[in-house]
Image (cartoon, coloured by chain):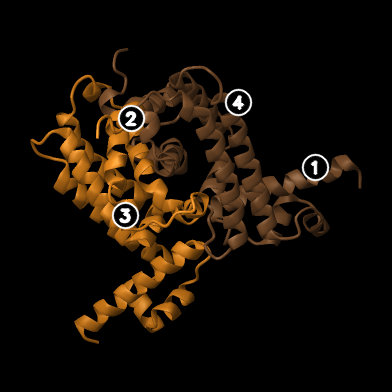
Chain colours: A orange, B brown
């Protein structure tokens, strides 16, 4: 087995797992099904992952490492908070659009009975929260800086940004809308308006 | 079979299904498992529901009917938008705290391959959006009233309000916090501050 074909089969397994977990849930997907969809040998899944939980852990790592890198790139530094938040939101939305299934699995999957998955997810989110708050909090104006409760605002930002993608098949029907490039053109900025200035302040002046 | 014992076994089946779907997902739960957990006879599940999708539909109906009733009670009328939103958020959070598993199933479950579930959910959310926007939009100040894109703000509010509950087992670990009555005392109002005034305006003056 060459290094390249090994990396290749690892990636095929991950992609097959993401697709199956996104459409049927982690719990309802079998390891054999993943192997079959990936078109690799059973030996490969043992070699690269060993078990279904390890596959889910690898998916979580991939998603949150990328989100943490986006926070790291956009939130620290001397720019005004508003500019940082807008850049951060645009980069996140662009990533969510590229990887809707990965995102759905990484955010939604939370098997109650698997402490190792819970621990992995908590560790990654802890790192994200640390990166985002160290980067953003110092640049917030007072009194916002002193009043923010990160344990409330943190999950709320995640919900605000991800709800559209998590519910997309349903809201496409609700609003009878296709979500094309035109729809997404100002999407990240509208969410940033809402997050920074609220419903009363959103889109003050055009 | 008396009317009362029939209603009783229907409720037992619903409660068992909510618990199992919340912990293992809809896709991974079998109808027999629900019957066993409910402690009723197989005849009862056939009599009341007939199939697993019908059970999920009944769960969606229960949750969204309640949420629509909360919107109906709090959002129409002549009061200022701020007061309506605060009342609405408080009532929603109080309901989510009472029914965390029902909420988790009703929001998270979105089996891609079951158009009848997608249709049911879309119909209920359409009714919620209509109730909420007819009640709230006319009381918004300009320019917010004209600028709001309901298809963006709607799902965002849902994400903002539900993220804490959807991710609770993880964020409990991340922030090493127990979510007791003290934590929740101002929770709905902090989310309302964030939603109405944004991060920059949140908790202006205490």
Residue of label 4: B73
| Numbered label attached to residue B8 | 1
Residue B181 seen anywhere in this rendered image of the structure = no
Cα–Cα gap, marks 3 and 1: 51 Å
Cα–Cα gap, marks 4 and 2: 23 Å
**Which mark is in front, 3 or 2?**
3
Chain of the residue displaying label 2: A
Which residue ends up furthest to the top in the rendered image? B206
Give the x, y percent position of residue B70. 59, 30
Residue of label 3: A182
Q: Disc 1 on helix, strand or loop?
A: helix
Q: Disc 4 on helix, strand or loop?
A: helix
**Which mark is in front, 1 or 2?**
2
Give the x, y percent position of residue A157. 33, 39
**Which mark is in front, 3 or 1?**
3
Local crowd at mark 4 within 10 Å, few (<14), some, or many (≥20)? some
Cα–Cα gap, marks 3 and 2: 23 Å
Foreground residue among B61 and A188: A188
């Amino acid at each position: 087995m060459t290094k390249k074909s090994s990396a290749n089969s690892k990636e095929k397994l991950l992609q097959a797992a993401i697709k199956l977990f996104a459409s049927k849930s982690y719990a309802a997907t079998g390891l054999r099904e993943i192997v079959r969809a990936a078109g690799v040998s059973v030996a490969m899944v043992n070699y690269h992952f060993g078990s279904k939980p390890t596959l889910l852990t690898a998916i979580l790592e991939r998603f949150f490492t990328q989100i943490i890198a986006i926070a790291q790139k956009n939130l620290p530094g001397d720019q005004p908070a508003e500019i940082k938040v807008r850049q951060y939101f645009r980069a996140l939305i662009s990533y969510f659009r590229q990887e809707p299934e990965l995102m759905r699995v990484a955010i939604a999957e939370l098997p109650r009975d698997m402490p190792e998955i819970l621990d992995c997810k908590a560790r990654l989110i802890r790192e994200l929260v640390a990166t985002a708050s160290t980067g953003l909090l110092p640049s917030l104006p007072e009194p916002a800086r002193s009043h923010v409760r990160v344990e409330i605002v943190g999950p709320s930002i995640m919900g605000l940004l991800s709800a559209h993608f998590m519910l997309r098949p349903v809201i496409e029907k609700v609003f009878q809308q296709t979500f094309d490039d035109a729809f997404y053109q100002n999407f990240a900025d509208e969410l940033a308006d809402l997050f920074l200035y609220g419903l009363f302040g959103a889109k003050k002046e055009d």
